[in-house]
Amino acid sequence: MANTYTPRFNIINILKFAFAITGTKAFIPYTTSKINQRVPPVNIGMPTKTDYLSTLPPEIGLKTSTVETQKITPATQEIEAPILVQGGSLRTWSYRSPLVEQVQVVLSSEGRPLDADLELWHGPDNTPCKLRVYVEDGHIRPFNAVIATPRGPNTIAIRNIGQIEFPLSVQVDAETPDAPSNECTSSARTIQGGALRTYPFDPLVNSVQILLKTDGRPLNARIELLQGPNNNKQVVELYTEDGFTRPFFCILETPDTGNVVRVVNTAPVEFPMTAAVVPHTIDQEMSSYKAIGGTAILGGDLAF
């Protein structure tokens, strides 16, 4: 049986396929059905204020502003505590400001001997002041000196040259250093190079002031605190390249009786210096015996 072609059925099939495609909207662009979003969209835009503090909680912002506006006044600053320097170690204090013209240095111990080197550094390889300090008992007789530091920056270097069993305490003060009294500055006497001068003191004198100066020449001196023959309680060897701009001032404790201060000019005869040694503190309780025994000699001036 021959296969006959019937175009009627082909047209009907084409129309059915066309209506089916139109109902499904498969080929129509941008007509897909929308999906219901259960989660709201997240806003990822930048905040209107660029200050990061505005995004913090209110309590955090208040604390931050309080800390930033707080100021430390000089009255609230604490005094620097003494620093322990072990035997054989070095400690330095630098002052960059040229307004620091004097620095007070106090060396002490717990009662053991004290042996230290003190240097003033002013620039590289420049040491305008050197000290060698020995004290038999750093608790009874602490070393107290004022070092002139003009034309900063300057550095104070302290080296404990004693054994490791002999630590020392160091306190450096640049705010309120001691100054010589009017009696000390007005009682200066000249000591020629190679000469010495002794100053005996009464037992009621607890401490003495010592001021050494020159007319601008180098200063080389040796200060000894004696208590009996050949009994050095404290020895200071001093060098200053300019005794006028960098004079030496110190306060020595003189407890007990028989104290004599001896100042030696170790420089040649071409380099004289002036020295002043006067009482600093006097025991008022012991001074009452003057009314019974007459006039007490607080300090003498014996030249040799």
Image (spheres, helix red, strand yellow):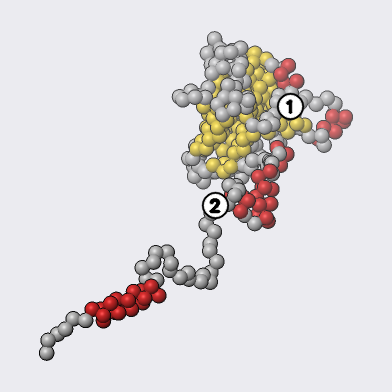
289 and 107: which one is in front? Answer: 107
Callout 2 amino acid: Met
Quick one: quadrant of the C terminus?
A: top right
Residue at horizontal 52 percent and vertical 57 percent from the top = 44
Secondary structure at numbered mark 1: strand
* 246 shown above or below 104: above
Going by the image, does 7 lie left or right of 104? left
Q: CA distance from mark 1 to mark 2?
A: 77 Å
* Residue 46 tag number: 2
Residue at far bottom of view: 1
**Residue labelled with disc 1:** 279
Quick one: quadrant of the N terminus?
A: bottom left
* Residue 134 tag number: none
Residue at horizontal 57 percent and vertical 43 percent from the top = 84
Going by the image, does 251 lie left or right of 3? right
In front: label 1 or label 2: 2
Q: Position of residue 113 (x, y in %)?
A: 57, 40
Q: Position of residue 204 (x, y in %)?
A: 77, 32
Q: Position of residue 264 (x, y in %)?
A: 59, 20
250 and 200: which one is in front? Answer: 250
* 197 shown above or below 92: above
